[in-house]
Image (cartoon, rainbow, N blue to C red):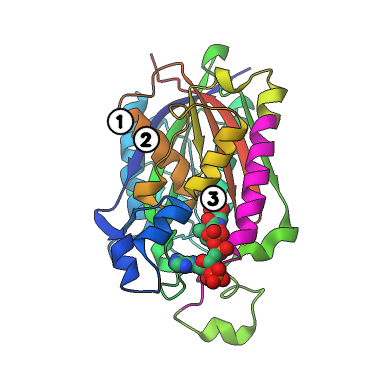
Amino acid sequence: MAYAAFRSIGAYVPSKILTNEDLATMVDTSDEWITKRTGIKERHIAGENETTSDMGVEAAKLAIERSGIDSSEIDMVICATISPDYFCMPSTATIISTKLGLGNVTAFDISAACTGFVYILSIAKAFIESGMKKNILIIGAEKLSAITDYSDRGTCILFGDGAGAAVISATDNKDEAIIDVHTGADGSYADLLMTPNGGTGSPHDSLDQEAGACFMQMKGNETFKVAVRTLTKDVVEILADNNLDGTDINHFVPHQANYRIIKAVGDALKLTQKQVIVTVEKYGNTSGASIPMAINDIYEDGSLKEGELMLLDAFGGGLTWGSALVPFSPKK
Ligand code: UT7
């Protein structure tokens, strides 16, 4: 049986920065409120003509370069995004694949909001373990600024743009293998976090509205409470299922939505500050891109070492959730 190894990571962050002070000139808010309630100080915003696929391509180039394989060996591309280049079709993954010159490999998107990266990790693992694919490029990429209502202070302070990518490859060595991935969903909470307009579920006249057709809406406080509960339950279960505990984890990499959520989950697991990876202060919430962007940060600052165990944990619109136990296994 083939195992799936997490070989490499890459990320891209657009250069333009939107600070809390900038937002305070746009809506009734303050740096003090945003910092205290979310931990966010700034977020990066893509250029007007910069697309989700453009950012995904830059992250993917780095991940492929660091994977030790040739790009011609990639046999599948999966992109997690809720802000695709085009709603419906073509998929952002096909655009990324073509921009990278990967040939006619299988390419598709999935929609699982902030849990997207954990979902595509589970898909890549399954395809590799089944023997159907050998080297899969997975990408979380978001231009959330394009679907954010900058007159809504409840959401516009949270979101940012960026992309992260990883190469998952087949290996015979069980020590290198992704240990486990859990995913779940509950549509009965759909109304907590959604883009209510612009699809077949919306009133037909809303399809005619150009501006605001696809803006995100969130019941923040209710989402917060479900997030803490679900994220904690999720990691407790995946650790127990694999006879591990918090002391076995080198890096806890949660979805970066709100520092208070991250802290609550880290405290519940009795993790040290060093174990818990926090990037929300500089990137805000980048949905499906947030986990790979955070992994890239610890890779680039030298704190992610070969063989170290990462615990990923995500939660988002749908509602969806997921967790994963992932050793960092660069190609030898
Ligand atoms: O990524 C997917 C999952 N997403 C999440 O998990 C996000 C979860 N939610 C959150 O992070 C938090 O709920 C928020 C940061 C969105 C909001 O924080 P909160 O502590 O839950 O605040 P709240 O919604 O309960 O609002 C408290 C007060 C309200 O005023 P009143 O009614 O007490 O007078 C809001 O109107 O804060 C007010 N408020 C603001 N004030 C200044 C809401 N947004 C702002 C703002 N600036 N930006």
Name the residue: 47% across, 73% down: 152
Rounded to the nearest angstrom, the CA distance separating label 3 from label 1 is 23 Å
The percent coordinates of residue 256 (x first, y second) are: 47, 46
Q: Which quadrant would residue 123 be assigned to in this image?
A: top right
Name which residue type carries label 3. Cys
Q: Mark 3, residues whose alpha carbon is within 10 Å: few (<14), some, or many (≥20)? A: many
Q: Secondary structure under badge 3?
A: helix
Magenta-tinted stretch? 212-236
Query: Badge 1 is on which residue?
Result: 300
Query: Badge 3 is on which residue?
Result: 114
Q: Quadrant of the N terminus?
A: top right
In the displayed structure, does residue 131 sit left or right of residue 148?
Answer: right
Instruction: Give whichever of discs 3 and 1 has the lower sequence position.
Output: 3
Q: Tell whether circle 3 marks a residue whose Cβ is less than 8 angstroms from ligand 1.
A: yes
Name which residue type carries label 2. Asn
Q: Secondary structure under badge 1?
A: helix
Q: Nearer the viewer, residue 150 or 9?
A: 150
